[in-house]
Amino acid sequence: MARSARSVKKEAYWRGLVDAQRRDGSAVRTFCRRKGISEPSFYAWRRELQKRDAERAGAAGNGPGGGDVRLIPVAVVPSAGEARPHVQEADRLLEIRTPSGFTLRFAGRTPPQTVARLLEVLAGGGEGGASC
């Protein structure tokens, strides 16, 4: 059943707010006050969007992280260690947060091929695939 245009707009509105709060990093209560939105509505929509995303992934037969690959915005931010010029490359961290809620952290010395292979396996494109 197709969603109405209003429903699509409303979903896009709340997705934007949920993403903005996540990027902002502030507490939900602070974010909601600043935006003038209801905190219970924010939590309800966040849950609903997670549910819809899970249903879409399941309906596509992919499961979370499956073959339905989407590009998402990426923010490259300096870590606290970058403020100190004496930090070695090996001391730096790469952190990847997936839309499904996984956080992957790698040491700066991790070979890029290893990171790429792990992401491929998590996405189900590797040998045997993985269900995350």
Image (tube, rainbow, N blue to C red):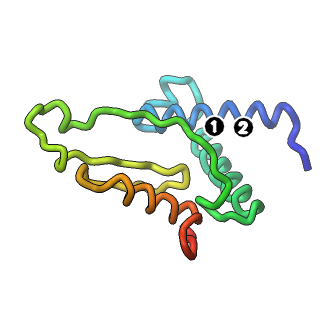
User: Measured along the vertical axis of the image, is residue 38 above or below residue 69?
Assistant: above
Mark 1 vs 2: CB contact within 8 A? yes
Q: Quadrant of residue 116?
A: bottom left
Q: CA distance from mark 1 to mark 2?
A: 6 Å
Q: What residue is pinned by disc 2?
A: 11
Q: Residue at x 11, y 32 (%)?
A: 85
Q: Is residue 101 visible?
A: yes
Give the residue at x 55% y 73%: 127
Name the spot of residue 41 as percent of width and height, x first. Answer: 63, 39
- In the rendered image, which quarter is residue 76 located in? top left
Side (left or right) of 67 relative to 3: left
Q: Nearer the viewer, residue 120 or 66?
A: 120
Q: Residue at x 54, y 67 (%)?
A: 126
For the residue pair 80 and 49, the one nearer the viewer reads as 80
- Res 29 visible: no
Q: Residue furthest bottom?
A: 128
- Front residue of this view, candidates 99 and 13: 99
Say what amino acid the circle numbered 1 marks: Arg
Q: If the image is split into quadrants, where does the C terminus sit?
A: bottom right
Query: Residue 113 vs residue 82: left or right?
Result: right
Mark 1 residue element: helix
SS of the residue under disc 2: helix
On residue 83, the disc is none
Q: Residues within 10 Å of mark 1 (few under 14, many from 20)?
A: some
User: Which residue is depicted at the point 81% across and 37% down?
Assistant: 7
Say which residue label 1 marks.
Answer: 15
Q: Residues within 10 Å of mark 2 (few under 14, many from 20)?
A: some
Query: Foreground: 44 or 122?
Result: 122
Residue 103 coordinates in the image, percent (x, y) = 41, 54
Residue 80 occupies quadrant? top left
